[in-house]
């Protein structure tokens, strides 16, 4: 695995995730209060396994205006309300204990045991931010490992191998990396699993570091959330389907494979045992209720015409609780890049690649639609696009490898496309952060403020002011975000050329990948 590529990618994504950690108010990230309460409970010995369990926590972790339910939160799903309505977890309330619920009360305790110690030691906003940074550290290690493997695979193949991995890390993913939420590490682990499996089975990568990445990422994916085992098995089946029998036998004959397989199996057993012990299996019985859910044929029409586009957009451009949209042109640009990669691989990569990509995309959307329809019976919507990201991230990674490995796009053209995409999509990470900060600091005057442009929909676009501001008047968050963008942009441009109009030949590009790895 390329040590230099790992370090640079780790640093870039850690800086971006840290920016989100420093910028978001308490409970501004998806379901954060629920996970904070769960983390404190686990570190306090309250390792419940029931969904309806109550947890005793300091009052500072359940401030005024915040709560486990949408009704109890003053700003959740309310874009015209700033984060000032929620009291900040403050020092001085730690000694007053209260009993509260958590929608994550029966989640596997392992993640919370790892990241929850700052919350237990400092049950205030500082402890929450520290726990966010620990989560960011975990996710950045996994994504950095995936990038390093992709750079190794790019030698002699082209930049699209790396491009597929970077396209999988959407602004929604980066948002989750800077939150107290196991969803961020889950998606990062899935990215590492897909990349390492493709390297091992399809690219014949026998590196011990690639195998170790799969072992660590596969074990992590299996224990974080209840669907992780399914996502892991899906990745194994889809990638193995594209491998030659000879390669499968070679992999099975390696003792190191069996050693790491034992680690992953142990994690799967632990994850499955917790699911059986707890009551978290299946779709939750309640959520964001609405009176607008039709039934019968009208439900299917609503699902296909409104819900499917909603969670498609949620794969890339809907941050926070899935209610803050980045400008539509940037979301469209991301989908154009992914779509071009998928179409190229599907049309010219062969029948096996077509079946693999179809299985990934169909599997993700069948899950989202099925979960939505099941919840709609109880008069609420369940699905957000991010729920299926651990499976769907496999599509651009697999397509990028297929396009590069089969020479479907000339190496020089791959480099040029990567550079142009980098100039647009990497800064888009900063724009997503900026708009989400504006939402919490100034609020929006429209329910859908960012379908095209932000201006005119809020009283100010200044991230350094507002009714509520992050620590340091948002300066640390902005500096971290800009630094992360600069690091990642420099990394990609350095691997593929000096700028968006550089004219470098395939030999030069290969030399750059060798140097950077």
Image (cartoon, helix red, strand yellow):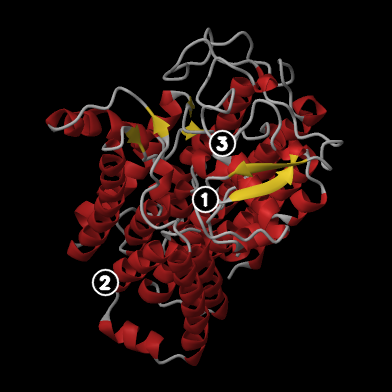
Farthest right residue?
Answer: 92
Residues under labels 3 and 2: Cα distance?
34 Å
Element class at badge 3: helix
Instruction: Give the structural element (helix, strand or loop) at label 1.
Output: helix
* Dot in front, 2 or 1: 1
Residue 303 position within the rendered picture, expressed as x and y whole percent measured from the top left:
24, 33
CB atoms of marks 2 and 1 within 8 Å: no
For the point 26% across and 38% down, the residue is 377
Mark 3 or 2, nearer chain start: 2
Mark 2 and mark 1: Cα distance apart in space:
27 Å
For residue 136, the mark is none
Asked which quadrant contains residue 23, the reply is top right
The residue carrying mark 3 is 429
Q: Quadrant of the N terminus?
A: bottom right
What residue is shown with label 2? 241
- Residue 400: percent from left, percent from top: 38, 55
Residue pictured at 66% horizontal, 23% vertical: 83
Tell me the mark number nearer the camera, choosing from 3 and 1. Answer: 1
Residue 183's disc is 1
Quarter placement of the C terminus: bottom right
Q: Earlier in the sequence, mark 3 or mark 1?
A: 1
């Amino acid at each position: 695995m390329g040590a230099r590529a790992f370090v640079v990618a780790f640093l870039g994504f850690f800086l971006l995730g840290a920016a989100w950690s420093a910028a978001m108010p308490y409970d501004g990230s998806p379901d954060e209060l629920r996970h904070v309460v769960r983390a404190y409970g686990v570190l306090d010995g309250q390792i419940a396994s029931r969904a309806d369990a109550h947890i005793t926590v300091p009052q500072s972790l359940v401030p005024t205006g915040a709560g486990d339910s949408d009704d109890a939160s003053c700003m959740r799903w309310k874009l015209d309300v700033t984060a000032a309505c929620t009291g900040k977890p403050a020092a001085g309330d730690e000694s007053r204990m209260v009993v509260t619920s958590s929608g994550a009360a029966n989640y596997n305790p392992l993640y919370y045991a790892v990241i929850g110690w700052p919350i237990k030691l400092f049950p205030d906003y500082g402890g929450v931010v520290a726990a966010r940074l620990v989560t960011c550290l975990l996710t950045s290690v996994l994504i950095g490992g995936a990038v390093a493997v992709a750079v190794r695979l790019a030698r002699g193949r082209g930049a699209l191998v790396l491009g597929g991995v970077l396209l999988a890390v959407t602004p929604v993913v980066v948002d989750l990396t800077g939150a107290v939420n196991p969803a961020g590490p889950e998606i990062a682990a899935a990215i590492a699993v897909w990349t390492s499996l493709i390297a091992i089975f399809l690219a014949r990568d026998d590196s011990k570091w690639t195998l170790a990445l799969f072992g660590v990422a596969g074990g992590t994916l299996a224990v974080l959330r209840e669907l992780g085992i399914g996502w892991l098995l899906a990745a194994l089946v889809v990638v193995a389907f594209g491998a030659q029998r000879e390669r499968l036998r070679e992999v099975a004959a390696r003792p190191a494979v069996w050693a790491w397989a034992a680690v992953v199996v142990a994690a799967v057993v632990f994850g499955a045992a917790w699911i059986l012990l707890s009551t978290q299996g299946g779709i939750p019985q309640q959520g964001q209720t609405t009176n607008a859910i039709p039934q019968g044929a009208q439900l299917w029409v609503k699902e296909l015409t409104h819900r499917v586009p909603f969670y498609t957009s949620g794969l890339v451009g809907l941050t926070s609780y899935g209610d803050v949209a980045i400008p539509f042109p940037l979301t469209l640009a991301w989908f154009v890049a992914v779509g071009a990669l998928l179409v190229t691989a599907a049309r010219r990569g062969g029948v096996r690649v077509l079946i693999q990509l179809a299985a990934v995309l169909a599997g993700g959307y069948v899950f989202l639609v099925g979960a939505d329809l099941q919840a709609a019976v109880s008069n609420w919507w369940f699905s957000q696009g991010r729920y299926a990201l651990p499976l769907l991230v496999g599509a651009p990674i697999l397509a990028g490898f297929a396009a590069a490995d089969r020479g479907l796009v000339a190496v020089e053209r791959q480099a040029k496309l990567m550079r142009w995409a980098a100039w647009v999509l990497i800064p888009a990470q900063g724009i997503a952060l900026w708009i989400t900060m504006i939402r919490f600091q100034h609020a929006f005057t429209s329910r859908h403020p960012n379908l095209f442009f932000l201006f005119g929909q809020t009283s100010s676009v200044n991230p350094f002011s507002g009714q509520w501001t992050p620590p340091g008047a948002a300066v640390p968050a902005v500096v971290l975000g800009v630094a992360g963008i600069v690091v990642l942009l420099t990394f990609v441009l350095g691997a593929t050329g000096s700028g968006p109009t550089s004219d470098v030949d395939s030999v030069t590009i290969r030399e750059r990948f060798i140097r950077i790895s």
